[in-house]
Image: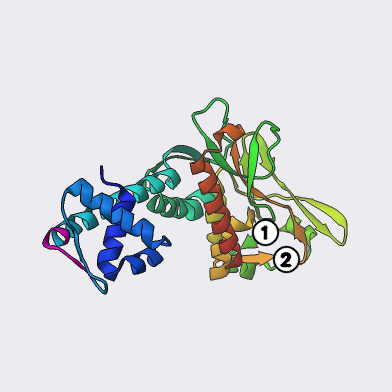
């Protein structure tokens, strides 16, 4: 039986024209290289080299065999690389719940990019601002703002320092003025968000160590984060949104942040799952990917 290492030594000797040079290239002794060539010639029952004191050249059998030896080793190397890739290549189906505004405008393009990198990963995506029941619904993961109340959930940080911003369109601010202090919000049309049975109509801030909570009112309430953002873009009022939801709009000037001197509510972003057993290689890779994307997105 032909040994693979003997084939490598044979090819090196043919390329170098010398046993000693082949041995040096492969970090072997000349005696080991010579023994390998003798074994190979015995297995093939053919002389592969013509040896002289100063040179080493292939015989006609050696030249014919060299072509097949190169092809064989190339195929073996390709097979080994394929096995190595398979060990690191991730696969599987991930059922993912993502929030409305962030999901449609930020996450979906990133998920497309992730799948281009990892074509054996499939996504089942649900878009909703409601927190999916990861125990009962067929959902593996959820991207959500805020620290979960359920201690049984594993919360993998995607961006821990994200905060909310008060923002409005330039047209709205031109018509109604720019609020200078949080108490000015009482005199503005504030666009509220309702999640389940909870109406988010009290906007919280901190300033110089003091906590401020302002009850707000307005003529529009929506249960969809994207809807509230669209109202703000259309000039219908002030919105209190996660910075990530409106970051592209702020940078483009479609929305203007107000009350920036006041510390707004934290809105950390997490990738949630039920149990650490769900942290498959695909989940780990997705979390790393999203973490880096949010970091770059925030930096601009």
Q: Position of residue 68 (x, y in %)?
A: 18, 55
Which mark is drawn over residue 260?
A: 2
- Judge from the rendering whether residue 69 lies leftward or rightward of residue 233; answer left or right: left
- Judge from the rendering whether residue 268 lies leftward or rightward of residue 118; answer left or right: right
The answer to whether residue 122 is above or below residue 78 is: above
* Cβ atoms at labels 2 and 1 below 8 Å apart: yes
Q: Residue at x 69, y 58 (%)?
A: 188
The image quadrant of residue 154 is top right
Residue position marked by numbered label 1 in the rendering: 165
Please give the range of residues in magenta.
56-62
Q: Under tag 2, what secondary structure? A: loop
User: In the depicted view, which residue is nearer to us: 179 or 296?
Assistant: 296
- Judge from the rendering whether residue 236 lies leftward or rightward of residue 186; answer left or right: left
Q: Residue at x 57, y 59 (%)?
A: 246
Q: Residue at x 54, y 67 (%)?
A: 254
The answer to whether residue 127 is above or below residue 40 is: above
**Label 2 crowding class (10 Å Cα cut-off): few <14, some 14-19, many 20+?**
few
Q: Position of residue 220 (x, y in %)?
A: 60, 48
Q: Position of residue 251 (x, y in %)?
A: 56, 69
Q: Residue 201 magenta-drawn?
A: no
Q: Earlier in the sequence, mark 2 or mark 1?
A: 1
Q: Quadrant of the N terminus?
A: top left
**Which residue sits furthest front?**
53
User: In the depicted view, which residue is nearer to us: 252 or 33?
Assistant: 33
The image quadrant of residue 178 is bottom right
**Label 1 crowding class (10 Å Cα cut-off): few <14, some 14-19, many 20+?**
many
């Amino acid at each position: 039986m032909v040994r693979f290492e003997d084939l490598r030594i044979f090819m090196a000797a043919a390329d170098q024209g010398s046993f000693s040079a082949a041995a040096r290239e492969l970090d072997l002794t000349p005696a080991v290289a010579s023994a390998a060539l003798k074994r190979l010639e015995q297995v093939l029952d053919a002389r592969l080299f013509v040896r002289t004191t100063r040179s080493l050249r292939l015989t006609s059998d050696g030249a014919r065999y060299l072509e097949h030896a190169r092809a064989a080793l190339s195929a073996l190397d390709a097979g080994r690389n394929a096995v190595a890739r398979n060990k690191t290549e991730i696969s599987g189906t991930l059922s993912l719940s993502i929030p409305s505004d962030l999901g449609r405008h930020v996450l979906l393009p990133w998920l497309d990019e992730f799948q281009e990198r990892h074509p054996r990963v499939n996504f089942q995506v649900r878009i909703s601002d409601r927190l999916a029941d990861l125990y009962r619904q067929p959902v593996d993961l959820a991207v959500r703002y805020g620290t979960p109340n359920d201690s049984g959930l594993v919360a993998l940080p995607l961006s821990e320092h994200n905060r909310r911003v008060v923002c409005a369109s330039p047209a709205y601010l031109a018509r109604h003025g720019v609020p200078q202090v949080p108490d000015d919000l009482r005199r503005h049309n504030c666009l509220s968000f309702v999640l389940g049975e909870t109406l988010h109509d009290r906007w919280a801030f901190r300033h110089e160590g003091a906590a401020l909570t302002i009850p707000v009112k307005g003529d529009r309430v929506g249960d969809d984060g994207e809807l509230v953002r669209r109202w703000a873009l259309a000039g219908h009022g002030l919105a209190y949104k996660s910075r990530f939801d409106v970051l592209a709009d702020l940078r483009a000037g479609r929305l203007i942040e107000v009350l920036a001197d006041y510390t707004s509510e934290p809105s950390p972003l997490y990738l949630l799952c039920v149990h650490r057993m769900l942290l498959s290689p695909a989940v780990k890779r997705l979390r790393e990917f999203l973490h880096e994307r949010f970091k770059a997105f925030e930096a601009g």
